[in-house]
Amino acid sequence: MRRPPPRHRRSKETASDGAHTPDALRAQPAPSPSEARWARLTARERETAALCLLKYRLIADRMGISVEGVKKHAQNARAKLGVHDKVGLALYALRMGALMMAPEDGADDEKTLGARADEHPTQLPNSSPFGE
């Protein structure tokens, strides 16, 4: 019977060209369960989650898709992440460092966030209650 060819031993260090060996790769920590779930989202679902504080119409305009498409991406992202609403999706995106509060094109906050002080009578005035 023939013997199988001998296996070559690999160095436990990084090669001279900077490439990592399998031993060096094993030292990397495993992603957290939250990061693993985030990684399972499609690019469109991640983009929708990152922009979820905006109105669906603004997200749709930015992504170049219909409002129904945005709603479907948000629904799929919420299901995959195990969250139940836009707030949960926003918090998840915030933890992952992906949350965007305003479009990059420089739109003003009133249009972006869709809120004006005169539309919300329960909103507190901008002055501080501490006299600052």
Image (cartoon, rainbow, N blue to C red):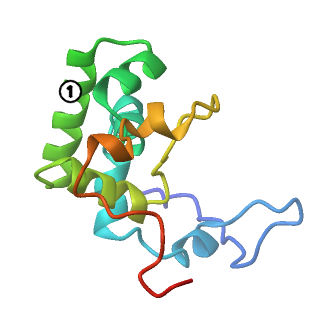
Element under label 1? Answer: helix
Given the current orientation, which residue lies at the most extreme bottom position? Answer: 130
Q: Looking at the image, is 5 positioned above or below residue 129?
A: above
Going by the numbered disc 1, the residue's amino acid type is Lys
Q: Position of residue 61 (x, y in %)?
A: 43, 16
Residue at image point 40% right, 65% down = 95
Given the current orientation, which residue lies at the most extreme right position? Answer: 16
Given the current orientation, which residue lies at the most extreme front position? Answer: 131
Residue at image point 33% right, 64% down = 124
Residue at image point 18% right, 35% down = 76
Q: Position of residue 92 (x, y in %)?
A: 31, 59
Left or right: where 86 falls relative to 11: left
Q: Quadrant of residue 48?
A: top left
Location of the C terminus (image quadrant): bottom right
Residue beneath label 1, please?
71
Residue at image point 77% right, 71% down = 14
